[in-house]
Image (cartoon, rainbow, N blue to C red):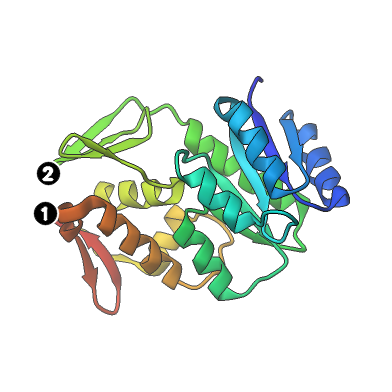
Protein backbone atom coordinates (compact mmCIF):
# COMPACT_ATOMS: atom_id res chain seq x y z
CA UNK A 1 0.00 0.00 0.00
CA UNK A 2 1.71 3.18 -1.21
CA UNK A 3 -0.90 5.68 -0.02
CA UNK A 4 -0.88 7.49 3.30
CA UNK A 5 -3.18 8.87 5.94
CA UNK A 6 -1.96 12.22 7.26
CA UNK A 7 -2.55 12.65 11.00
CA UNK A 8 -2.39 16.28 12.12
CA UNK A 9 -2.52 16.99 15.85
CA UNK A 10 -0.31 18.99 18.20
CA UNK A 11 -0.61 16.33 20.92
CA UNK A 12 2.01 13.65 20.44
CA UNK A 13 0.02 11.22 22.59
CA UNK A 14 -3.04 11.64 20.39
CA UNK A 15 -1.04 11.15 17.19
CA UNK A 16 0.51 7.96 18.59
CA UNK A 17 -2.87 6.59 19.65
CA UNK A 18 -4.37 7.17 16.19
CA UNK A 19 -1.25 5.93 14.41
CA UNK A 20 -1.09 2.69 16.39
CA UNK A 21 -4.72 1.80 15.64
CA UNK A 22 -4.47 2.67 11.94
CA UNK A 23 -1.13 0.90 11.48
CA UNK A 24 -2.68 -2.22 12.97
CA UNK A 25 -5.11 -2.10 10.05
CA UNK A 26 -2.28 -1.83 7.53
CA UNK A 27 -2.36 1.90 6.81
CA UNK A 28 0.75 3.99 6.22
CA UNK A 29 0.84 7.10 8.38
CA UNK A 30 2.34 10.56 7.99
CA UNK A 31 2.36 12.91 11.00
CA UNK A 32 2.30 16.67 11.46
CA UNK A 33 2.32 18.50 14.78
CA UNK A 34 0.98 21.83 13.53
CA UNK A 35 -0.86 23.36 10.61
CA UNK A 36 2.20 24.69 8.81
CA UNK A 37 3.91 21.30 8.84
CA UNK A 38 0.67 19.69 7.63
CA UNK A 39 0.51 21.97 4.56
CA UNK A 40 4.18 21.38 3.80
CA UNK A 41 3.75 17.59 3.91
CA UNK A 42 0.57 17.79 1.85
CA UNK A 43 2.23 19.89 -0.85
CA UNK A 44 5.07 17.38 -1.10
CA UNK A 45 2.99 14.19 -1.07
CA UNK A 46 -0.47 15.29 -2.21
CA UNK A 47 -0.85 12.50 -4.77
CA UNK A 48 -0.05 9.88 -2.12
CA UNK A 49 -2.33 11.13 0.65
CA UNK A 50 -5.72 9.43 0.58
CA UNK A 51 -7.23 10.90 3.76
CA UNK A 52 -6.44 13.51 6.42
CA UNK A 53 -7.28 13.43 10.13
CA UNK A 54 -7.11 17.09 11.12
CA UNK A 55 -7.25 18.61 14.59
CA UNK A 56 -8.88 22.02 14.93
CA UNK A 57 -6.95 23.70 17.76
CA UNK A 58 -3.24 23.83 16.85
CA UNK A 59 -0.34 26.27 17.09
CA UNK A 60 0.95 28.30 14.13
CA UNK A 61 -2.02 27.48 11.90
CA UNK A 62 -5.33 26.06 13.09
CA UNK A 63 -7.32 23.28 11.44
CA UNK A 64 -9.80 25.61 9.74
CA UNK A 65 -6.97 27.49 8.02
CA UNK A 66 -5.37 24.23 6.90
CA UNK A 67 -8.73 23.01 5.61
CA UNK A 68 -9.29 26.18 3.58
CA UNK A 69 -5.86 25.90 1.96
CA UNK A 70 -6.26 22.24 1.05
CA UNK A 71 -9.76 22.76 -0.34
CA UNK A 72 -8.44 25.34 -2.80
CA UNK A 73 -7.19 22.55 -5.05
CA UNK A 74 -7.99 19.19 -3.47
CA UNK A 75 -11.06 17.15 -2.50
CA UNK A 76 -9.08 14.66 -0.43
CA UNK A 77 -11.36 13.28 2.33
CA UNK A 78 -10.86 15.15 5.61
CA UNK A 79 -12.03 14.13 9.07
CA UNK A 80 -11.90 16.96 11.60
CA UNK A 81 -10.96 16.16 15.20
CA UNK A 82 -11.97 18.65 17.86
CA UNK A 83 -12.58 18.91 21.56
CA UNK A 84 -15.33 21.42 20.83
CA UNK A 85 -18.61 19.65 20.18
CA UNK A 86 -20.68 22.74 19.64
CA UNK A 87 -23.18 22.56 16.81
CA UNK A 88 -22.04 25.78 15.17
CA UNK A 89 -18.49 24.43 14.88
CA UNK A 90 -19.81 21.31 13.20
CA UNK A 91 -21.90 23.24 10.68
CA UNK A 92 -18.97 25.58 10.05
CA UNK A 93 -16.77 22.60 9.26
CA UNK A 94 -19.24 21.16 6.78
CA UNK A 95 -19.55 24.57 5.12
CA UNK A 96 -15.79 24.51 4.50
CA UNK A 97 -15.86 21.02 3.03
CA UNK A 98 -15.31 18.62 5.93
CA UNK A 99 -16.29 15.03 5.13
CA UNK A 100 -16.60 13.76 8.70
CA UNK A 101 -16.54 15.37 12.11
CA UNK A 102 -15.48 13.59 15.31
CA UNK A 103 -15.42 15.21 18.75
CA UNK A 104 -12.82 14.31 21.36
CA UNK A 105 -12.77 12.13 23.34
CA UNK A 106 -13.60 9.40 20.86
CA UNK A 107 -13.25 5.65 20.60
CA UNK A 108 -10.23 4.79 18.43
CA UNK A 109 -12.17 1.83 17.05
CA UNK A 110 -14.98 4.14 15.92
CA UNK A 111 -12.43 6.46 14.35
CA UNK A 112 -10.90 3.55 12.42
CA UNK A 113 -14.38 2.42 11.32
CA UNK A 114 -15.13 5.87 9.93
CA UNK A 115 -11.79 6.04 8.15
CA UNK A 116 -12.43 2.66 6.56
CA UNK A 117 -15.98 3.62 5.56
CA UNK A 118 -14.84 6.82 3.84
CA UNK A 119 -11.96 5.12 2.04
CA UNK A 120 -14.22 2.31 0.91
CA UNK A 121 -16.59 4.81 -0.65
CA UNK A 122 -13.86 6.86 -2.32
CA UNK A 123 -12.20 3.76 -3.75
CA UNK A 124 -15.40 2.16 -4.99
CA UNK A 125 -14.77 1.54 -8.67
CA UNK A 126 -18.16 2.02 -10.27
CA UNK A 127 -17.67 2.21 -14.01
CA UNK A 128 -20.72 4.29 -14.63
CA UNK A 129 -21.47 7.71 -16.04
CA UNK A 130 -24.82 9.29 -15.28
CA UNK A 131 -26.04 12.25 -17.31
CA UNK A 132 -29.27 13.94 -16.38
CA UNK A 133 -30.24 17.33 -17.81
CA UNK A 134 -26.60 18.28 -18.37
CA UNK A 135 -25.43 17.16 -14.92
CA UNK A 136 -22.87 14.42 -15.59
CA UNK A 137 -21.56 12.19 -12.82
CA UNK A 138 -18.57 9.95 -13.51
CA UNK A 139 -18.68 7.43 -10.67
CA UNK A 140 -15.36 5.91 -11.66
CA UNK A 141 -13.49 9.18 -11.45
CA UNK A 142 -15.84 10.63 -8.79
CA UNK A 143 -16.24 13.80 -10.82
CA UNK A 144 -19.23 16.00 -11.59
CA UNK A 145 -19.66 18.37 -14.50
CA UNK A 146 -22.44 20.74 -15.47
CA UNK A 147 -22.87 21.33 -19.20
CA UNK A 148 -19.34 20.05 -19.73
CA UNK A 149 -17.72 22.18 -17.01
CA UNK A 150 -16.27 20.36 -14.00
CA UNK A 151 -17.41 21.48 -10.56
CA UNK A 152 -15.60 20.82 -7.30
CA UNK A 153 -17.59 18.95 -4.66
CA UNK A 154 -16.46 17.61 -1.31
CA UNK A 155 -16.90 13.87 -0.77
CA UNK A 156 -20.07 14.42 1.25
CA UNK A 157 -21.53 16.88 -1.28
CA UNK A 158 -20.80 14.40 -4.06
CA UNK A 159 -22.45 11.52 -2.20
CA UNK A 160 -25.49 13.63 -1.35
CA UNK A 161 -25.95 14.72 -4.97
CA UNK A 162 -25.58 11.12 -6.21
CA UNK A 163 -28.13 9.92 -3.64
CA UNK A 164 -30.65 12.58 -4.67
CA UNK A 165 -30.23 11.80 -8.36
CA UNK A 166 -30.40 8.04 -7.86
CA UNK A 167 -33.71 8.62 -6.08
CA UNK A 168 -35.01 11.30 -8.43
CA UNK A 169 -38.68 12.25 -8.13
CA UNK A 170 -38.82 10.69 -4.66
CA UNK A 171 -39.33 12.91 -1.61
CA UNK A 172 -36.53 12.07 0.83
CA UNK A 173 -36.79 12.96 4.50
CA UNK A 174 -33.79 14.50 6.25
CA UNK A 175 -33.54 11.46 8.52
CA UNK A 176 -33.46 9.12 5.52
CA UNK A 177 -30.76 11.23 3.89
CA UNK A 178 -28.70 11.16 7.09
CA UNK A 179 -29.03 7.39 7.37
CA UNK A 180 -28.05 6.77 3.77
CA UNK A 181 -25.44 9.44 3.09
CA UNK A 182 -23.91 9.96 6.52
CA UNK A 183 -24.39 6.27 7.23
CA UNK A 184 -24.04 5.09 10.83
CA UNK A 185 -24.26 6.70 14.30
CA UNK A 186 -24.53 10.32 13.17
CA UNK A 187 -26.20 12.36 15.88
CA UNK A 188 -25.81 15.83 14.46
CA UNK A 189 -28.53 18.30 13.64
CA UNK A 190 -30.40 17.74 10.38
CA UNK A 191 -29.54 21.33 9.46
CA UNK A 192 -26.22 19.86 8.36
CA UNK A 193 -28.12 18.59 5.31
CA UNK A 194 -29.58 22.03 4.62
CA UNK A 195 -26.07 23.47 4.66
CA UNK A 196 -24.84 20.89 2.14
CA UNK A 197 -27.88 21.35 -0.12
CA UNK A 198 -27.28 25.10 -0.20
CA UNK A 199 -23.69 24.59 -1.33
CA UNK A 200 -24.62 21.99 -3.95
CA UNK A 201 -27.31 24.23 -5.42
CA UNK A 202 -24.84 27.08 -5.65
CA UNK A 203 -22.25 24.92 -7.40
CA UNK A 204 -24.80 23.53 -9.84
CA UNK A 205 -25.78 27.06 -10.87
CA UNK A 206 -29.02 27.10 -12.87
CA UNK A 207 -29.25 23.32 -12.52
CA UNK A 208 -29.61 23.77 -8.76
CA UNK A 209 -33.32 24.36 -9.32
CA UNK A 210 -33.79 20.61 -9.78
CA UNK A 211 -33.20 20.08 -6.05
CA UNK A 212 -36.61 20.88 -4.58
CA UNK A 213 -37.32 21.60 -0.94
CA UNK A 214 -40.27 19.56 0.31
CA UNK A 215 -41.66 21.55 3.21
CA UNK A 216 -41.84 19.59 6.45
CA UNK A 217 -40.10 16.57 4.89
CA UNK A 218 -36.78 17.15 3.18
CA UNK A 219 -35.67 17.26 -0.43
CA UNK A 220 -36.35 15.80 -3.87
CA UNK A 221 -34.41 15.84 -7.13
CA UNK A 222 -37.06 16.54 -9.70
CA UNK A 223 -36.85 17.25 -13.42
Q: Which residue ends up furthest to the bottom in the rendered image?
A: 216
Q: CA distance from mark 1 to mark 2?
A: 8 Å
In the rendered view, does 42 fall on the left or right side of 193? right
Q: Quadrant of residue 216?
A: bottom left
Secondary element at image label 2: loop
Q: Earlier in the sequence, mark 1 or mark 2?
A: 2
State the residue position of label 1.
223
Tag 1–tag 2 contact (CB < 8 Å): yes
**Looking at the image, residue 135 lies above or below residue 171:** above
10 Å neighbourhood of mark 1: few (<14), some, or many (≥20)? Answer: few
Tell me what residue is drawn at x 50 percent, y 68 percent.
Answer: 91
x 71%, y 30%: residue: 27
Quadrant location, the N terminus: top right
Give the number of callouts: 2
The residue at 52%/39% (across/down) is: 76
Q: Which mark is residue 210?
A: none
In the displayed structure image, the side of residue 57 where residue 141 appears, left or right = left
Q: Position of residue 157 (x, y in %)?
A: 39, 51
Of the numbered discs in the image, which one, if any, rests on residue 133?
2
Crowding at mark 2 (Cα within 10 Å: few <14, some 14-19, many 20+): few
Q: Nearer the viewer, residue 70 or 111?
A: 70
Is 140 drawn above or below residue 88 in the view shown? above
Q: Is residue 168 visible?
A: no
Residue 152, image x, y percentages? 35, 43
Most foreground residue, 28 or 168: 28
Which quadrant of the figure has residue 146? top left
Amino acid sequence: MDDYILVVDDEERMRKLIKDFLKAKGYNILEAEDGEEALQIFSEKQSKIELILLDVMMPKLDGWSVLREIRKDSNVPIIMLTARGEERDELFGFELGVDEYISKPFSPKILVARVEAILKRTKANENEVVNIEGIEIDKDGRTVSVDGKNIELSLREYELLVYLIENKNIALSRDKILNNVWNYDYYGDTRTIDSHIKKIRHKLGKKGKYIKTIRGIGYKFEI
